[in-house]
Image (cartoon, rainbow, N blue to C red):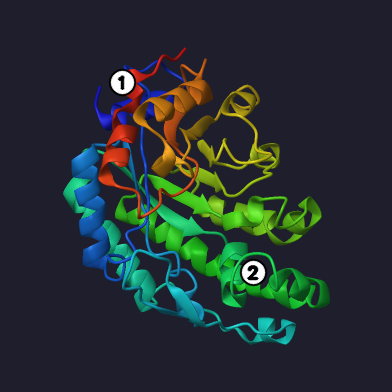
Amino acid sequence: MDHKKRIRATLIGEKTDRMPVSSWGHDFLREWSAEELAQHTVERQRKFDYDLVKLNPRWTMFAEPWGNQYCRPTTQEFPKNTYKMIHSAEDLSRIERVGVDHPVFQEYERALELVLNDIGDDVDVVATIFSPLGVAGLLCGGVGEPLLSFAKSNPQDLEQLLSHITDTLQALTERVLKLGASGIFYAPLQWTSLNVCDEPFYEQFGRPYDLQVLKAAEGAELNMMHMCGNNIDVERFLDYPVQVLNWDNFGKGNPTLQDVHAKTDKVVSGGVPHMKLHKLSEQELEELTQEAVAGLGDRMILTSGCAVGAGIGDKIRLDIAHLPDRLTVG
């Protein structure tokens, strides 16, 4: 069974020869041009032969077109934010609309084209899209505060900004699917965590804009919803129009894969303890993963619950690729 057949069978709940597997992460030194990002993505796939590929751009990319500035790192660490566009609630109304033809987005599309041309016939490639709330938070400097306070004092201008960002992300989603991506990896960042914002906040400033962006991906075969952080109520997202739900099942306060699998006909994605990978022996990794996926013989893709750290060595990543061969499922 080849990669695409294995994924398609998993999406409709059919048995496969083995559990599909994938992993993604940053290489902070090779994400600053279309060519570097594509080369890194293709090299990794050729080395580990995963069942799907997530195009994983630099996380600053979605804030750059609106004016945020970052320092390109010289070591494997997140880029430092050197300038943010929003410093006060009044600034929310001053952010201008951004077209999908912005050079940063063109760079991302070029990277996707290069990856698809190289490996797209053999494996599904999904393109990362941040959520409007995720982008708005980055324009304020991160996740949570100060955007939470700005929303209380100036909710109308925040909603206007979210609407502008949504228009751009919808257009970008349509573009990446037209280029040949199998779907999108939709990432609201840690805004999905109840530790960051409560359900009423997300219902007002997150969900409506999520659904608008996801509507632009309607018809794609492989859309993934990523819920980031701890204390995630995954049930809030069960009705999202995606085929795959991805979260850290090892995170504090998060549900197990089995809990969610029993409540939906969607595919669940997780099972690899990415926060502990550098501390685990091969046997410990296998035991934790085996427990995480026990009883899941269908509608399951073995992945980490978030990006694998750039500092984790190839040996551990290779273990992830080979894990399905050593697991007992079903």
- Front residue (pair 255, 213): 255
Q: Quadrant of residue 175?
A: bottom left
State which tag comes first along the sequence, 2 or 1: 2
**Kind of residue at badge 1:** Asp
- Disc 2 vs disc 1: Cβ atoms closer than 8 Å? no
User: How far across and down, in percent of the image, does residue 100 sit?
Assistant: 43, 72
Q: Residue at x 46, y 49 (%)?
A: 185
User: How far across and down, in percent of the image, does residue 281 sit?
Assistant: 37, 32
Q: Quadrant of residue 27?
A: bottom left
User: How far across and down, in percent of the image, does residue 47 sit?
Assistant: 19, 42
Q: Residues within 10 Å of mark 1 (few under 14, many from 20)?
A: few
Q: Residues within 10 Å of mark 2 (few under 14, many from 20)?
A: many
User: How far across and down, in percent of the image, does residue 240 sit?
Assistant: 61, 42
SS at badge 1? helix
Residue 221 in view: no
Residue designated by label 2: 162
Residue 323 against residue 38 in the figure, above or below: above
Residue designated by label 1: 325
